[in-house]
Image (tube, rainbow, N blue to C red):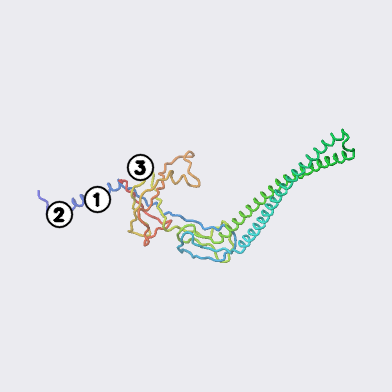
Amino acid sequence: MRLAPTRFVVVTLAALVLVAGIAVGVRHWRYYLAHQETDDAQVEGHISPVLPRVSGYVARVLVTDNQHVDAGQALIEIDPRELDLRVAQSEAALQNALAEQRTAEASQSGARAAAATAAANVETALVRQRKAASDLERDTKLLGTGAITDSQFTDTKAAADTAAAELDAVRSEARTADLQIAVAAARAAAAQTQAAEKASDLDYSKLQRSYASVTAPIAGLVSRKNVELGQFIQAGQTLLSVASDADVWVVANFKETQLTHMLPGQAVEFEADSYPGVLFQGKVESISGATGARFALLPPDNSTGNFVKVTQRVPVKIVLAQAPDADHPLRPGMSVDATVSLSQ
């Protein structure tokens, strides 16, 4: 039985459509077997807060909202006059401490010289005492023979006693001089320590003075500026933020069931909602060590109440495999659709 021509054409077209549909379906099935995708993904990047390290009044605001700045670029100037006065005070205190140190070192030198003189006096007195003792020993023998008078012996003995007393006196002075050396050395050490402390205070004052210029911690765009000319700001107060426009990456939250064959190094294609039709290339850098729920303020506790199994999501970090595109900049917080190729 032959089909009518019209019916034959319809059946043939239907068969072709069916075969094409099967081919397309198989192709999509094979594609999805080798790929995992998610639209729960967003661009992340470094957002550094800009905080002053010293308090004071704002003298100059050098940037505006959304302005591009380089790392280390001056953003805000704080009135430095009070900080300059502290530097001057520290410098004066250091000079006083150095003068005291020089005085103490001079006293130490004087004490050493006095000790040297006292030691010489001891040697001189010792020579005199030995001579006087020798004369006394000689005259004692002569007195027994009647060669000298009692008056002469008395004079010799008085001279020996005087020499011995003088020796004791200069020895006492020498001991005192030695003690003065120790005292002077202690004072010199204390003055040196004081000078070092004042030098440290000066360095700290200069460091605080350098903080009068608030600089950008990273390169990027000025965001959320909250500072005006003449405003009094406190140390640690957030004045603005700098969002990196170069060092960005994507965090894609895949279902745990999608991670079976996902590995670092696999190729990724993603499209940002801001740039339809523009594909960015990247690769999986790492997979989080825990699900996103584990990092919540109040993590779920499945051991209490009735348990309902919920598929969890795991953050996956994706880095760009290409240089940043100036025509299509990626900014932290942008939503993207990411597809990971599991075949690589």
Amino acid beneath label 2: Val
Between discs 2 and 3, the one toward the N terminus: 2
| Residue sitting farthest toward the top | 144
Q: On the picture, is 331 further left or further right than 165?
A: left
Along the line of sight, the residue nearer the viewer: 332 or 256: 332
> Which residue is at 16% across, 52% downward?
12
Image quarter of residue 52: bottom right
Mark number, residue 260: 3
Q: Residue 15: x, y in percent?
A: 18, 50
Please tell me how crowded label 2 is: few (under 14), some (14-19), or many (20+) other residues with Cα within 10 Å.
few
Q: Are marks 1 and 3 in contact (CB under 8 Å)?
A: no
Distance, label 2 to label 1, CA atoms, is 22 Å
- Element at label 3: loop
Closer-to-camera residue (10/111) = 111
Q: Nearer the viewer, mark 2 or mark 3?
A: 3
What kind of residue is marked 3?
Thr
Q: Seen from this angle, which residue lies furthest left?
A: 1
Q: Are there few (<14), some (14-19), or many (20+) residues within 10 Å of tag 1?
A: few
In the picture provided, is 259 more to the left or to the right than 66? left
Q: Earlier in the sequence, mark 2 or mark 1?
A: 2
Residue 66 lies, in percent from the top left, at: 46, 63
The amino acid on which the numbered mark 1 sits, given as a three-letter code, is Val
Mark in front: 1 vs 3? 3
Label 2 to label 3, Cα distance in Å? 47 Å
Residue projecting furthest to the right: 150
Assign a secondary structure to mark 1. Answer: helix
- Residue 89 pos. (x, y %): 65, 60
Q: Which residue is mark 2?
A: 9
Instruction: Residue at 51% x, 57% y: name it.
Output: 49
Say which of 210 and 303 sits in front.
210
Q: Is residue 231 left or right of residue 8?
A: right
Asked if residue 246 is positioned above or below residue 170 in the image, the reply reads below
